[in-house]
Amino acid sequence: MSLLEDGHARRFHYLRLSVTDVCNFRCTYCLPDGYRPEGRKSFLDQAEIARVVRAFAAMGTRKVRLTGGEPSLRRDFTDIIRIVAATPGIEQVAMTTNGYRLRERAAEWREAGLTNLNVSVDSLDARQFHRITGEDKLTEVMAGIDAALAAGFARVKVNAVLLKGLNDHELSTFLDWIKTRPIELRFIELMQTGEMDALFTRHHASGEAIKGQLLAAGWVQQLRAIDAGPAQVFHHPDYLGGIGLIMPYSKDFCAGCNRLRVSSVGKLHLCLFGDDGVALRDLLAADEQQEALMERVHMVLGHKLASHRLHQGNSGTTPHLASLGG
């Protein structure tokens, strides 16, 4: 079976695999009213996850990111890491987390095969963190990041959603924090989703202002690796840490797209802001279905659009970021 390539000559080496859409935080830009289950859901089990990852690895996937909701809320999350890490062809196993269980589990996850870690920290001010996330957990999350570094994660990425009037004034504070720590801080522009129109209008800020400040201060933009995310990454010789900017409204943002998404209920999504996904779960019941699974993925990939439609105010069918893991 050939490698994954769409009709725009983009190759896909990176799979974002959601293992649950449940989250225990109440972030203003995602789940301000908390997680609200919509009927009874059966999330992919370990055998189904193994088959998905094995099929994608056979088609050239080298990096898998485990997402949620909050993925660590699954009791079998460590076992899921082991399954993914043991899959032939998979070279990187990453997760995105709110840091809720990081302090207690960082070493365990590292031993299981986790290689990359992204932690959400939207503010370094405890009161503002509480206001944005709905949880007074900054101290615990920061202790989790320290535990991850102590456990041997060579570099930890920290995600901060850029919010006008809430945290867009904190650049200098964040820079002071990463000066002596091997942390890549990534500012992510607020993205419009189906349930967040008013909040987007109120709090969206472009990352271009931060980019200008970084370049003026001697930061240098780095070349993008083949399996990297969409961030524009900057380094400075006086800083151990780095800065990444994810700006989905910037020109040609989608030109380097290299990832596909599978939801926690087994749907393939070609774009975070696309239309309803395509079911794969009917082909995950047995190992003998792998060829058919791969053929379906290839067929669907032929319909991937050149770009999202956020500039037209169209966020697809994504109600909030937790539904697909961002």
Image: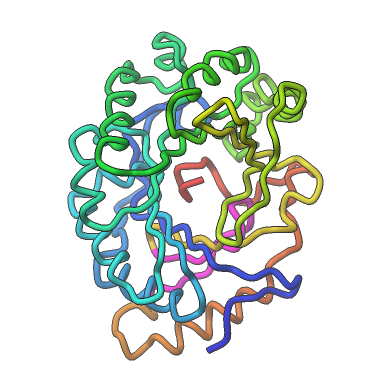
- The span shown in magenta is 266-281
- Locate residue 151, reporting x and y percent: 25, 41
The residue shown at (47%, 68%) is 62
Is residue 100 placed above or below 301 in the rendered structure?
Answer: above
Is residue 261 placed above or below 279 in the rendered structure?
Answer: above
- Locate residue 300, reporting x and y percent: 60, 75
Q: Main secondary structure of the magenta part?
A: loop
Magenta stretch: residue 124 in it? no
Q: How is the structure coloured here? A: rainbow
**Which one is nearer the viewer's eye here, 313 or 239?**
239
Q: Quadrant of residue 248?
A: top right
Name the side, left or right, on which 245 lies relative to 140: right
**Which one is nearer the viewer's eye here, 132 or 250?**
250
Magenta stretch: residue 276 in it? yes
The residue shown at (19%, 54%) is 76
Name the side, left or right, on which 78 lies relative to 168: left
The residue shown at (59%, 76%) is 4
Name the side, left or right, on which 194 lies relative to 308: left
The tally of labels here is 0
Q: State the residue lying farthest toward the top.
A: 127
- Locate residue 172, reporting x and y percent: 59, 14
- Locate residue 111, reporting x and y percent: 21, 53
The residue shown at (57%, 60%) is 276
Q: State the residue lying farthest toward the front.
A: 237
